[in-house]
Image: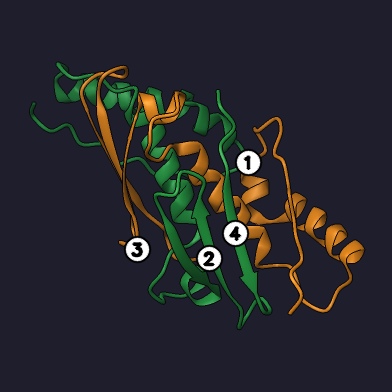
Chain colours: A orange, B green
Amino acid sequence: MAARKADAEWTGNLREGAGTVKLGSGTFEGKYSFATRFEEAPGTNPEELIAAAHAGCFSMALVAGLDDAAFQEQAKAAKENCPVSKALRGVETITLNARLFPA
Amino acid sequence: MAARKADAEWTGNLREGAGTVKLGSGTFEGKYSFATRFEEAPGTNPEELIAAAHAGCFSMALVAGLDDAAFQEQAKAAKENCPVSKALRGVETITLNARLFPA
């Protein structure tokens, strides 16, 4: 697999500083801070970027043409076995909410 | 910490399907596909989202007023110990490239 990159810049201290994260593809650049991460200020945070990576990873593996029970089964298996899940071994709880939309 | 969310939608099969990832904060929505993930097509991919989360996480912990040697030391420690690093225990190699800009 190609190497994938991102940049983060942070100015100031933890509590009052401000940062920017940028995806290597150039598709997103977003502001973040203590308040966007640990409180509810508008902006991004590392945890939702991981959530997006994870959801993006295992949803690719799901196939159409299943009924909902089979789909939920597949979604659960994908959540356990996709490369991002394996990377995230250190995370205690990850919640999956999978919905199948009719084609 | 607040719960952080993201959504992914995928339509079609792994090889020819297409997807969208969305951050819970609403700051980013991006297209991805087999080609953006495993080849070099323009678009995002789960791996660079993780890279952004990781860089964003540990750069918050770095403090100004250090010389470069002390900064590199701190950056290395932050990379080992930030919550995202701990979550990513399953990842074999993560490369750090830290630069200190004069205040």
Disc 4 crowd, CA 10 A, few/some/many (<14, 14-19, 20+): many
- For the residue marked with disc 1, what is the amino acid? Leu
**Residue B38 drawn above or below residue A18:** below
Residue at the spot of label 3: A25
How far apart marks 2 and 4 lie (CA) works out to: 6 Å
The mark lying in front, picked from 3 and 4, is 4
Check if mark 2's residue and mark 4's residue have beta carbons within 8 Å. Answer: yes
Looking at the image, is mark 1 or mark 3 earlier in the sequence?
3
Output the chain of dot 3. Answer: A
- Whether A68 is drawn above or below A23: the answer is below
Image spot of residue A33 (x, y percent):
33, 29
**For numbered disc 1, what is the local secondary structure?**
loop
Type of the residue with mark 4: Ala
Is disc 3 surrounded by few (<14), some (14 to 19) or many (20+) residues within 10 Å? Answer: some
Q: Residues within 10 Å of mark 1 (few under 14, many from 20)?
A: many
Chain under numbered label 1? A
State the CA–CA distance, disc 3 to disc 2: 15 Å
Q: Secondary structure at mark 4?
A: strand
Check whether the beta carbons of the residues at disc 1 and disc 4 lie within 8 A of each other. no
Mark 2 highlights which residue? B20
The label on residue B8 is: 4
Instruction: Return the mark for residue A88.
Output: 1
Q: Secondary structure at mark 2?
A: strand
- Res A66 seen here: yes
Looking at the rendered image, the quarter that the C terminus of chain A falls into is bottom right
**Residue type marked 2:** Thr
In this rendering, the answer to whether A98 lies above or below B55 is below
